[in-house]
Image (cartoon, grey):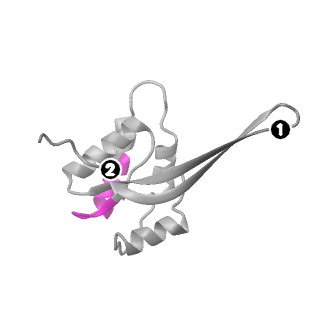
């Protein structure tokens, strides 16, 4: 994710999901995740550094929160499915307000309220 978990999110992870520990990406890997270039192809070598770390920390059935740039997210979610990890994403309710200021400028306010974590699902033929 592009931010730390809120206290409410941490509580959900520990109580509802019954996780024993929460591991955040080390700073070096967080920098990779937050600074993926929008130019050219997806840097698989950099993403594989994150995967190497995940392999050292995660065990079968562990939850992995994956949110970010779409292609990178897909790549890591695909890895999670292939290695028996449970990829999650956060859902939120968004509230939007727009105020017209005295000088004619418009101020837009977006409020994101965390609702829950949800599992990514694979497509399955019915």
Pinpoint residue 8: horizontal percent, then vertical percent: 51, 68
Indicate the secondary structure of the residue bearing disc 2.
Answer: helix
Q: Earlier in the sequence, mark 2 or mark 1?
A: 2
Q: Residue at x 38, y 39 (%)?
A: 72
Q: Nearer the viewer, residue 62 or 100?
A: 100
The residue that mark 2 highlights is 51
Could you tell whether 100 is left or right of 33 in the image? right
Q: Which residue is mark 1?
A: 101
Depth order, front residue of 58/97: 97
Q: Is residue 23 left or right of residue 59?
A: right
Q: Nearer the viewer, mark 2 or mark 1?
A: 1
| Location of residue 85 in the rendering, given as x and y in whole percent from the top left corner | 25, 57
Quarter-of-image position of residue 44: top left
Q: Residue at x 44, y 53 (%)?
A: 91
The answer to whether the residues at label 2 and label 1 have Cβ atoms under 8 Å apart is no
User: In whole angstroms, how far apart are the C-alphas of marks 2 and 1?
Assistant: 47 Å
| Residue 110, percent from left and from top | 63, 46
Neighbourhood count class around disc 2 (C-alpha, 10 Å): few under 14, some 14–19, many 20 upward: some
Residue furthest right as drawn: 103
**Main SS type for the magenta part?**
helix
What are the residue bounds of the magenta stretch? Answer: 49-63
Task: Answer left or right for 101 relative to 68.
Answer: right
């Amino acid at each position: 994710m592009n931010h730390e978990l809120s206290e409410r999110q941490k509580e959900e992870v520990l109580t509802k999901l019954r996780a024993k520990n929460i591991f955040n990406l080390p700073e070096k890997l967080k920098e990779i995740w937050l600074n993926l270039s929008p130019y050219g192809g997806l840097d698989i070598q950099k993403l594989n550094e994150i995967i190497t770390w995940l392999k050292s920390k995660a065990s079968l059935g562990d939850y992995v929160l994956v949110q970010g740039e779409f292609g990178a997210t897909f790549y890591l979610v695909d890895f999670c499915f292939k290695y028996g990890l449970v990829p999650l994403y956060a859902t939120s309710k968004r509230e939007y307000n727009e105020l017209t200021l005295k000088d004619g400028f418009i101020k837009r306010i977006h409020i994101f309220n965390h609702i829950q974590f949800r599992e990514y699902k694979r497509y399955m033929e019915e």
